[in-house]
Image (tube, rainbow, N blue to C red):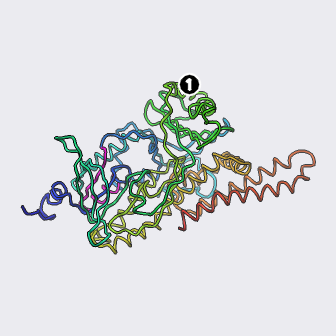
Amino acid sequence: MSVPPVSAPGGARRRREHHHEADVVVVGAGVFGCAIAFALANQGRSVLLLERWMTEPNRIVGELLQPGGIAALKQLGLGHCVEGIDAIPCKGYNVIFDHIPSLVPYPTVDDGGEVIYSWSGSGKNGKRPEGRSFHHGKFITRLRESCLAHENITVVETEVIKTMRGEYTDHVLGVETRTKDKETGKRKPDYFFGQLTIIADGYDSNFRKDAIGDKKATVKSKFYALELIDTILPLKNYGHVIIGKNTFPTLLYQIGTHETRALFDVPIGIPEASPAAGGVRGYIKNVAIPALPPSVQPAAFKALEDGKIPRSMPNSWLPPTKQVPKGVILLGDAFNMRHPLTGGGMTVAFSDALLLSRLLDPSRVPSFEDAKAIRAAVNVFYWRRKNVTSIINVLAQALYTLFAANDRQLHALQNGCFEYFQRGMTDGPCGLLAGIIQRPAVLAYHFFSVAFLSLWLNALVICAGPLGFLKAPLALIDAVLILWKASCVFLPLVWREGFQ
C-alpha cells in the first residue's frame, strides 16, 4: 500500500496515526510540551505529542501562573485554558514577616502593558495585570484537550524509552516507546519518527544526560504540601508568603473556590525536622503552622490530622546549558529550573514556547530537516530567552536565600527587603517577579537598593543609644560584610543565568 503524500487531504494525519511520522515529535504533554506542540501545530507543522499517562496529574506545584505567563499563554492561543477550571484571580503577594504584613500588589501598567514605576515607588491608581491560581491537573487537562482537538496534532499515550539515531550518524530520528496494547493490556515496542524531536519530560528527566551532559539540579530543600478546605486568608486574591523568626518560608494561595494550597519549605537536614523532633510532620505541626495567620491555623491543623507525611516536591535549581541540537532539543523543567518560591516556572515555560516557536516559524525554518537552521534558531533562543528567564530565575534563587536566612548578614538583608516593601518600593520587584519587566538592569538596581537599605538599617541599630557613634567602626565592618554577602548571593547567579 502506498503512503499518502502529506499534501493530500488528511495525509499528514494518516502518516502520524498509521506510520508514526511527523515534522516534530514532542515528548511530554505537560506545561511546556503542550504549549510548544500547539504553537508549532498552529504554524502548520505535523506534530506527534507523546505522554506516558494521559490521566489528570495530581501535583503540588505548577498552580500559580504569573501575569507574564498569562500574556504568553494568550499569544500562544491557549488563553482559554485558564477558564472553566475554577481558577482564582491573583492580584499579587502579601508578605508576612514576623506577623507583620506588607502588601506587594502587581504593578500599575500603561496602555502598552509597560510598568509605570519600574525603578521606584508604586502606582496608586491604574490598570494592574492579574495572575491565576488553580489545580495543576485541571489546567494540564485543558491544555491537553486543546492539543487533542487540533487537526495537526496526534496525541499518543505511550512510554518513551530512548531516542533513536541513524545507523551512520548520531542525528536523532525519533524515539522508541512502549505502548499498551488495548486487547492484551501488555506493553509492546513502538517507534515514532520526526524531523525534530523536542523532549520536555519534567524535572526528573530521563534524557537530560544525553542532551546536556552530566548536569544535576541543586536541591537544598523540599516543599511539603497541605490542601486546606474553606480557610480564611488574611487577604482575598493574594498569594501569601509567611516568614517567621524561626521558620522557613511558607506559601499560601487559593487554588479553587474551597481549596487553598499550603506549601512548607523544609531544608534538608534541619534539626527542627529531625526524627527526634518528630520529623517533617513535627516541624510543620510545632513550628510552621503556629507561625501562620490565626485564621489559617485551624484548617492547617485539620489537614494534618490524617497522620501521613504531606506530599513533597524537591525545590531545584538547574541553570540552562547550551545545546548543540542533532535532531533533538531538551526543554522545560528538564532543561532549566528555579526555586518555586516566586511561582515563575510556568511563566518561563510559556515564554520559552512562544519564543522558540517564533524562531522556528516556517518563514525562518521552512523544513526541520535543515539541521543548520535548527542549530542557529536554538542558539538565538538560548541567549534571547535570558531577557525573561534570567530575571525570574535569579529573583527566585536570591529571594529564597534571603527569606530562608541562616546567618547574621542574611538576616540583615532579610530585614532590608521587608522594609523596602514597607516603604512602598513594590512595583519594580513585583513586575520582575510577574514576568512583565524584562530588563535585567532593573533587577540589579532593586537588589542592591535593598542591600544598601540593609546597611543603613543595620548601622542605625548598632549605633543606637548614648555614645552610639563610638560603635561606628563596628557598623562599617558590618556594612562591608553585608555588602559582601549580598554580592555573593547575587553576582554568581547573574553570571551563571545571564552570561553563561
Q: Tally the numbered discs.
A: 1
Which is nearer the eye, 17 or 190? 190
State which region is magenta.
Answer: 34-53
Mark 1 surroundings within 10 Å by alpha-carbon count, few (fewer than 14), some (14 through 19), many (20 or more)? some
Residue 216 spot, x, y in % from top left: 49, 56
Which is nearer the eye, 266 or 102? 266
Seen in the picture, residue 231 relative to 34 is either above or below; the reply is: above
Residue drawn 49% across the image and 54% down it:
337
Residue drawn 46% across the image and 53% down it:
68
Q: Is residue 43 magenta?
A: yes
Residue drawn 58% across the image and 27% down it:
297
Name the image quarter holding residue 271: top right
Residue drawn 54% across the image and 32% down it:
233
Q: Is residue 464 left or right of residue 312?
A: right
Looking at the rendering, in which quadrant would you find the N terminus?
bottom left
Q: Residue furthest right?
A: 467
Q: Residue flagged by tag 1: what amino acid is it?
A: Pro
Q: Secondary structure at mark 1?
A: helix
The residue indicated by pointer 1 is 298
Residue 498: tell me if it is visible.
yes
Which is nearer the eye, 328 or 348? 328
Residue 65 spot, x, y in % from top left: 45, 47
Residue 129 spot, x, y in % from top left: 48, 48
Q: Residue furthest bottom?
A: 372
Q: Residue furthest left?
A: 1
Q: Is residue 331 magenta?
A: no
